[in-house]
Amino acid sequence: MSAASSAPATPAAPLLTTPLNALHIELGARMVPFAGYSMPVQYPAGLMAEHVHTRTAAGLFDVSHMGQLKLIGADAAAAFETLMPVDVIDLPVGKQRYGLLLTDEGTIIDDLMFVNWGDPADTTGESRPRASGEREGPQLFAIVNGACKAGDIAHLQAKIGDRCQVLPMPERALLALQGPKAVDALQRMVPGVEKLVFMTGAAFAWNGTDLYITRSGYTGEDGFEISIHGSQAEAFARALLAEPEVAPIGLGARNSLRLEAGLCLYGNDIDTTTTPVEAALNWALQKVRRTGGERAGGFPGADKVLAQLDGSQPPKRKRVALIAKERVPVREPAPLENMDGQTIGQVTSGLISPTLNQPIAMGYVQPDYATVGTELFAMVRGKPVPMVVSSTPFVRTRYHRG
């Protein structure tokens, strides 16, 4: 026996818990490790029922594992813009935008959502979540992926910490209420949220507790994400669950809902090997940051990303949506082959769509195979499953745009 095999195994780091941990267990959730946290993958109703409930009523998700932070100071927007290929400077107060942190090679460190909070000193009569040690000045509020948050915060501190205050908000929980009846349930508790439209946010209060609510989410449905102090999260969640439309939903249905909506999962569909153009996220790069734009380039990997975008150096692979022609589950990392049996790509996410009742997937293929309607094969346990390149979303999104 080698010394290595006889050495005691290094104990895994204990899982973190969210402020709703006790509530999940009380509700009978099956808990699993996710992004370093113990998280509910499903409740006794099961994934299919939870998925359908979110599509037809309102589902409550605990997403408190995600990172919340503020960037504060007069230079915060300009500084943040140096790290992403998106328009930060021109984002109006109260508006939300999708962003991508990039490496120097133009690949994706993380995807995130951010809101322009403006300068609290300019706002009268509006409560706003405050953090200890907070400086004066304009604020951006960002939500980053749970598995990436420590690295993201360190990256921001290192790259722009001398230009603005990077202030993590670990004391806050994050809940998502998603579905066509989410607005009915939430406006009873927090009047005024019904006035929000997709990708906007505002400060509210509930029982004396500060809330920041955006009308957005990760399901393709209308819905809200609610930032609340962790000490009040369980009481707020219980009040929401008492509303007739609302049921608790786990990570399993969150994944099937986001895939039906054609939304990328960091670590599966995008990572530090993929550029925004390879990932078919061109829509996230505003015109002002593109070649010929007023603030073109000036972000990490700009030369490569803009060359891929304008076609002067086309990417060698592209993310596509796929629908199977047979009812065989196709999951990551199934290889993708052309009609001649040559490997031309790989599946990065896949499952049987609860809404469509057929297998759907996302993956990367060589550009010649990325056209909608192209037929190819996914190899599942050595057998070819015929697939067709599709458009996204697989299921029509129902965002409330006003």
Image (tube, grey):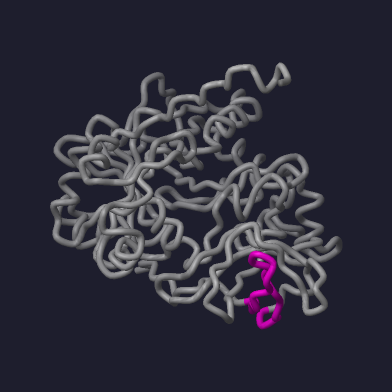
Q: Which residues are magenta?
A: 372-389
Is residue 20 magenta-colored?
A: no
The mark tally for this picture is 0
Q: Residue at x 71, y 77 (%)?
A: 376
Q: Residue at x 50, y 30 (%)?
A: 73
Depth check: give the residue in front, 167 or 339: 339
Is 328 on the left-hand or right-hand side of 222?
Answer: right
Is residue 373 magenta-colored?
A: yes
Reply above or below: 149 against 59.
above
Dividing the picture into quadrants, the one containing residue 401 is: bottom left
Q: Residue 102, position in %: x, y? A: 68, 43
Q: Residue 221, position in %: x, y? A: 37, 65
In terms of secondary structure, what is the magenta stretch mainly? strand
Depth check: give the residue in front, 28 or 400: 28
**Which image quadrant: the N terminus?**
top right
**Which image quadrant: the C terminus?**
bottom left
Reply above or below: 162 against 251.
above
Is 105 on the left-hand or right-hand side of 164?
Answer: right
Depth check: give the residue in front, 281 or 126: 281
Dividing the picture into quadrants, the one containing residue 103 is: top right
